[in-house]
Amino acid sequence: RALRVMGVDPGLVDTGFGVLEAGPGAVTVVDAGVISTSASQSLEARLNAIY
């Protein structure tokens, strides 16, 4: 059975994330990316984009 792990690097301007899957003898990147918001947006709009 494979194990999936998600990591998050929180931030209001850039929030990074990565999902790894570990199985017998191998670790695979399932997904990774960055959610970016603009510093000119309201706090509510930025949090809505992240979550």
Image (cartoon, rainbow, N blue to C red):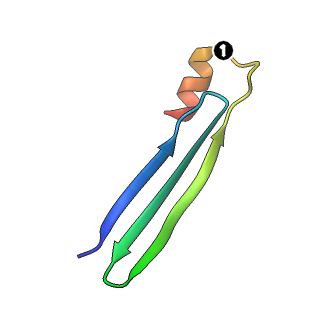
Q: Residue at x 41, y 53 (%)?
A: 6
Q: Residue at x 61, y 16 (%)?
A: 43
Q: Residue furthest bottom?
A: 25
Q: Residue at x 48, y 67 (%)?
A: 30
Residue 51: image location, x then y, percent: 48, 33
- Residue 24 position (above or below residue 20): below
Residue 18: image location, x then y, percent: 51, 55
Specify few, some or many for label 1: CA neighbours under 10 Å numbering under 14, 14-19, or 20 or more.
few
- The image quadrant of residue 37 is top right
Q: Amino acid at mark 1?
A: Ser
Residue 41: image location, x then y, percent: 71, 19
Image-based side of 47 in relation to 13, left or right: left
Q: Residue at x 66, y 14 (%)?
A: 42
- Residue 30 position (above or below residue 26): above
Say which residue label 1 marks: 42
Q: Residue furthest left?
A: 1
Image-based side of 25 in relation to 11, left or right: left
Observer-nearest residue: 49 or 13? 13
- Residue 51 position (above or below residue 41): below
Q: Residue furthest front?
A: 25
Residue 35: image location, x then y, percent: 62, 41
Q: Find numbered disc 1 in the image and state the secondary structure of the residue it sits on.
A: loop
- Residue 41 position (above or below residue 13): above
Q: Quadrant of the N terminus?
A: bottom left
